Amino acid sequence: MGRVTSTVVGTALVLASAGSACAQADLFSRDTLSGLVDLRLAAADGETSWIDGGLGKARFGDDHQGLRLGEAALVWNPRFSDTLSAVIVAESQDGQRHLVDMGEGYLAYRSRPGSALRLSARAGVFYPTISLEHDGLDWSVPDTITPSAINSWVAEETKVVGVEATIRRSLAGQTFGFTAGVFKNGDTSGTELTFRGWALHDIKSPVFGRFPLPPLAGRMASRQAPSTTPLAEIDGRFGYYGRIEWRPSSRLAFDLFRYDNEGDRTSVDANREWSWETRFWNLGMRLDLDTVAVKAQVMTGETLMGYSNAFGIWADVGFEAAYVSASKALGPGSATARLDHFSTTDRTNKAFDNNAEHGWSGLAAYRWDVKPNAQIVFEALYIDSFRRDRTRFALDPRQRQTVVQTAFRHQF
């Protein structure tokens, strides 16, 4: 991460100078601190979870359930002026390498309201604006426990160290926005998606942590490390992303997102982690009615790694996923239903290491707002997937799993 520090610091100084005109600082008051505690009661059947080194697609399997810590987070949001602030997140998630790790940390600039043309920018460690589900405190999912397959992967492998800027303009009752970002430390994006496949869970990538991979097949076991570091910088190259947003009304919004980490595919570090070449498109839609909110995303892309041989590049995988969800205000809370589809296509070396899969998932959840700062979320998740690689472990390539969870959440 040190190679990109000078870029982030330089941009931070520019943002600081832009926001210093009206110093309305608030660094350590109660208003600058917030937090979240999420205790989890889970029951599950099916195979061992991916977080425990298996091929299971959920956070919990039949060997990893009961009362657990879903997440604990502390968010510091100091304000240096009326336009300049920062976000620093410390978080703890069950099963991670460190008891406490950094979630996000960035400096943010937002122009003063009232102008038809609005500018915002940030520099540091953060998630690009892809997910339509993660809009709660500490980039959490407020309506359910488990995000879609798309946004579960976004949480794993798309966090960046970089800078971005957004311009928004309102015109004739419509709003248009354009975001551009440049980043490093996204070189391993695609590793988990290739060797494990899609998953559905609420684990987020820690800044200084790693994720396990399933036991690798054949020659890949000696080429690739048994774990992946989501924020590794390996090839020294910059990646980029862009986002276009259109809001034809206050109720309806569309966005189109393009991501390319510009990985060179063949750089490798001392830990045997490789630079992957990963790119994708994501199309999102949100419709807000009086009592119902509908969200949908479609993602398609590819990820490649390694040298070419007689059978093709070592790893060459196309991936697609989509979901649609609806949340309705109901009693003292809201009910949510979601349907997911996901697949990967292995385009090379399938005789030795077949990473193709396809599957679907259904979710039903109810969020009970016990108090304004306390909720209980009940969720049932069903996953049906077919992955040929399971036969290496004497497993049926088709696996079905049901996970039932209750989350006890408190914000402060």
Image (tube, rainbow, N blue to C red):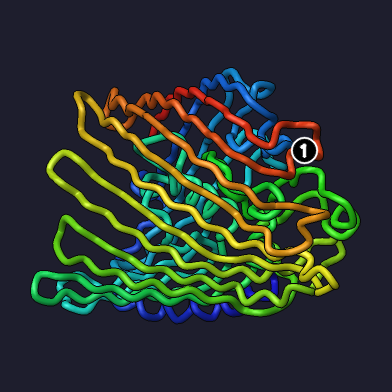
- At mark 1, the secondary structure is helix
Which of the 4 quarters of the picture holds residue 63?
top right
Categorize mark 1 by other alpha carbons within 10 Å: few (<14), some (14-19), many (20+): few
Residue 149 point in image, percent of width and height: 50, 46
At a point 74% along the width and 71% down the height, the residue shown is 234
Residue 350 point in image, percent of width and height: 76, 57
Location of the N terminus by quadrant is bottom right
Viewer-nearest residue: 373 or 78? 373
Numbered circles on residues, count: 1
At a point 48% along the width and 73% down the height, the residue shown is 241
Location of the C terminus by quadrant is top left
Does the rendering let one see residue 257?
Answer: yes
At a point 43% along the width and 24% down the height, the residue shown is 408
Viewer-nearest residue: 80 or 229? 229
Q: Is residue 205 left or right of residue 116?
A: right
Q: Farthest residue to the left: give it.
A: 172
Residue 376 vertical placement versus 189 (above, below): above
At a point 15% along the width and 70% down the height, the residue shown is 174
Which of the 4 quarters of the picture holds residue 388?
top right
Q: Is residue 318 left or right of residue 339?
A: right
Residue 49 vertical placement versus 17 (above, below): above
Which of the 4 quarters of the picture holds residue 214?
top right
Residue 318 point in image, percent of width and height: 60, 62
Residue 327 vertical placement versus 183 (above, below): above
Residue 407 vertical placement versus 240 (above, below): above
Q: Is residue 106 left or right of residue 53?
A: left
Residue type (three-letter) at the residue carrying disc 1:
Thr
Does the rendering let one see residue 412?
Answer: no
Identify the residue under disc 1: 391
Residue 346 point in image, percent of width and height: 67, 58
